[in-house]
Amino acid sequence: MFDDVPFITIRDIAKQFGATRALDGVSLDLRRGEVHGILGENGAGKSTLNKVLAGVLVPDTGTVEIDGENIQLGRPKQSRAAGLAMAYQELSAPPNITVAEKLFLPKLPVRLGIVSQRKLYSAAQEVLTAWGKPGIDARALIASLNLADRQHVEIIAAMATEPRLLILDEPTASLPDTTWLFDRIRELVARGTSVIYISHKLAEIRAICDRGTVLRNGRVVKQFDPKTADERELVEYMIGRSLNQAFPDKPDRAEHQAPLVTVTDLSIAGKVHHLSMTICPGEIVGVAALEGQGQKSLFYGLAGFVKADTGSITVGSGSTPARKNFSLVPEDRKTEGLFLTLTAQFNLTISELRRCSPLGTISSRKEKKIAQGAALAVNLPSPFMTRDIQDLSGGNQQKVLLGRVVLSAPKCLLLFDPTRGVDAATKVEIYHMTREFAQQGGAVLIYSTEIPELVGLCDRAYTMYGGRINGEFGGETLTENALMAGALGHGEKVSAS
Amino acid sequence: MKPRQSRRALSDNSKATVGIAAGIFVLLYLLLTLVSPISATSFIINNFIVLTTPLAFAASGVTLVLLIGGFDLSVAGSISLSNVIAATTMAAHPHSSWGIACLVLVMGAVIGLVNGVCVAVFGLPALGVTLSTNFILAGIALAVLPAPGGSVPAAFASVLSGTIGGTIPVALLALVGFSLLWLLFIKSRTGMSALAIGGDVKAARLSGIAVRRVQIVVYALAGLCYAAAGLYFSALTATGSPTSGSSFLLTAFAAAALGFVSFRGGRGSAIGAIFGAATLTVIPKFLFAWGIADFWVGAFQGLVILVALTIPWLTTKIAGLRKRDGEEVTVGSGPTQSISAMAETA
C-alpha cells in the first residue's frame, strides 16, 4: 500500500533502572502504514520502550527517527510534535477531569485564554462520534466511567491526534472485544499511520499485525510473520525456555480429598456475590477473570483485609488462629507490599518480628538468621539482604515478598498476580516455589492476568465474572480457551461442553 | 457491567461545595444578628469583611497549592515579611504607598516562584521546602523590624478598609474581584492543568501537561495571594509586626478545610475557602456576643470545622442507605467524594 522503506527507525535503545536493565539495545524498523506487534511477557521491557518513545523516560542510549527526522528523546512535547501518540496501559487520565478535557489535553480549545466550555464539549462529542463511541458522554467525569470506556477514551485521545506513529500498550486489557479497536486501527493505517501494537495476546497480534517482534528481558529475541508463526515457538521465545520446563509437573491427585479451605456463600461489599469454592491440601487453584470482576475483593476478603457481608470461610479443623490461615502476596508490591526505602532483610522479617524478639526487643542475630533461612527458601542471593529493596529488580522484590509470606507458614497462600513485572527466569522460580509450598501440604489460590500461566501451573481453576464463579476447570478441561471464554462471561457453556 | 455515568462536570461539583461553605457562614452570621442585632448594620458588616479579607487571601493561596496536591507552610513567613516591609517602607515614603504595595506583591510572587522551583524542578518535598522558606522569611522579617512598629499611611489604610460612597466596602470589592479572577483562572488551560495534576500527577504528565511549569505558576500565584494578605493585614492594623503572619498558618488551612478544599489535591475552590475564612472570623464575634470567654474561640473553631466536615460524610451515608434500598446512585456526583476521601486518608 505504501512504499517499502523504513518510515520509523528505532535504534539501540537502552535504559537501566537501578540493578534492572529494562531495555538492552532494542532496534526496530516500521514501514508507513504498518501495524507492528510486540510480544513479550510482563517485565520484558514493552512498557519501558513505550515510555521512551513517548518522551516520558529518557533512555541511556538510542535514537528514534521518523521519516528521516531525528526525535529528541526525553521530551514529551517533542515526541508529540513529531507525531507520536500513545495509549497507555495504565490509562493516563486523571480521575477528576471530564472525558472532553482528557480528549483535548494538553491543548484545550481556548477563547481569550479561557477554555471555551461549549466548544470543548461539542468538539469532544464530535470526536467521540467520529471514532465510533457516541454513547460516551463528553461531560462525564473520568472517574464515573467503567474500565472499558476509560480505555476507549484513552485510545480515542491518542487516535484523534492523527499521529504518524500510534503506540497501543495492551489496548484490549479492559475491552470486551476487539472489533471496535481493530476497525479503528485499519482506518488509521489506511491513512498512513504506523502502529506499534503491544500485547501478550498472540491471537490479537495475529489478527491485526503485519509483522511482529518478541521482546524478552529488554532485548529483541525474534522477528516473526504473525500470519505463519508457530504459537508454541513464539511462547518459548517469550519465556526464554522450552514450555515443558517452565512449569513444574502436576502431581496426580487423589479423587476424593477433604478440602483444606472451604468458602461458602461468600458476599463482599457488592463485589463478590454468593461465592463458594474449595481448595484441597497440596492443590494449586487458579482464578481467571477480566479486570474488576471481584477477584480482588475475594483475595483481600480471604486475607481479612475486607470484611465479608455474608458467608463463611473455614480452614482445616478451624482450630488455628485466623492470622495463620492465609497469607497474601498483594497486587502491587510497591505500594501494598514493600517498605521501599528499607532493606531486603527488614522487608523479609517484618511480619515475623515476634519470632526474632524473645525478650521484647529485636535480636539482630535472630532476625538475620530467620531472614537467611527465608532468603534461602526463595533463592535470594544473600548479598542482597542489606540492600534497600527499591534498588532490587522486580523479580527479586517479588521473591522477598514470597519469602515473607512463606515465613509466616500459612495454611493457604493467596497470590494475586504474582508474576507481574517479573523477569522470565524469576517467573519460573516462582512457579516452582509455589508448587513446592503445595507439595508440603499447603493450599494455594492464585489469580493471574496471564491465562497460560494458570493453565500451566494450576491443578484446577475457576473463572469469575461479575463477582460470581461461572466456571470450574480441571484436568483435560483446563485449557486457555476455556478459561478465556469463562473470563469473558461464557463459563457455563464451555464447562458443560 | 452497567456504565455508571455522571452528568456533573467538575465545575458543578465545586459549586455544590462552595454552596455548603457559603451556607454555613450565612447561617452563623444570621445567628449572630439574632444575638447581637447591631451586627446587621452596614458599619459592622464592613468591619467584618475587612477583618476577614487577610485570612481570605491567605486561605486562597493555600487552596491553590492544595489543588495541585502540594503543601505550603510559607504562608506565615510571607505575610509577616509583606507586613513589615509595607510598614517600614511606607512609613519612610508615604507618597509612594501604592508603588510599594505593587512591589510587595511582586516580592510575594517571587517567593512563591522559589518554592515552586525547589518543588517542581529540584523535586524536593513541598513540606520541607516551604517549612524552610517559612523560617527564612520569618527571620528576614525580624531583621527588617525586630519589634512591632512602623506605620502604614492613613491614606493607604483608609482606602483598603473604607467604603465607596459610604455603602460598598472596598474589601468586598476586592474579594468579589478576586473571586472573578479565580473563576477565570480555573477555566484557563493552566487552571485546568492544575486540577488534573492534583487529580493524578503521573497521568497528567502522560497526558502531555507541562507539570513543572504549572506547579511553578501555582506556587507563584499562591505567593502573590500571601503578599496580598500581608498588605491587607497592614492596612487593617496600620502597623507592622514581625510575627504578624504566624497566626495565619493554621487558620489558613482551617479556612481551606471549611471551604471543602481537598487536602489530597484535585478538588476545591478559593471561593469556598473565602467563605471558610469568613466562618472562622465570625466565630469569635459570636462567642463575644454570647459573653463566652475569649479562650474558648479555638475550641469552637475546631468544633465548627469538625461539624462542617461531617456534613458531606452524612450525605454519603444517606446516599449509601438509599442505595441499599435498591436505588441507583451515581458516583462522582456532589461534594461528598472529595471530603469523605479526605477524611479517609487524614
Image (cartoon, rainbow, N blue to C red):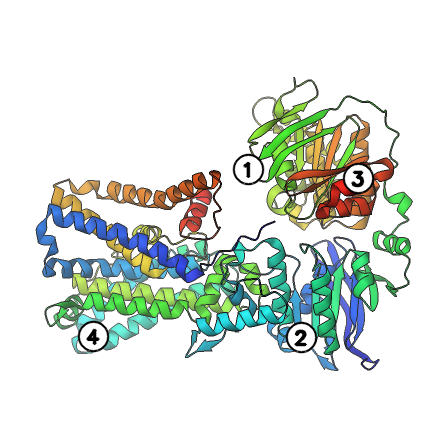
Res A495 label: 3
- Helix, strand or loop at label 4? It is helix
The CA span between labels 3 and 4 is 84 Å
Chain ID, mark 1: A
The CA span between labels 2 and 3 is 44 Å
**Labels 2 and 3 in the same subunit:** yes
User: How many other residues sit within 10 Å of disc 2, few (<14), some (14-19) or many (≥20)?
Assistant: many
Residue B230, located in which quarter of the rendered image? bottom left
The CA span between labels 4 and 1 is 63 Å
Res A163 label: 2
Q: Which residue is mark 4?
A: B97
Residue B121 appears in the picture as rendered:
yes
Residue B180, located in which quarter of the rendered image? bottom left
Write the residue at 39% across / 69% down: B185
The CA span between labels 2 and 1 is 43 Å
Q: Which residue is mark 1?
A: A269
Q: Closest to the observer: A468 or B140?
A: A468
**Labels 1 and 3 in the same subunit:** yes
- Helix, strand or loop at label 1? It is loop
Earlier sequence position, callout 2 versus callout 1: 2
Residue type at mark 2 is Pro
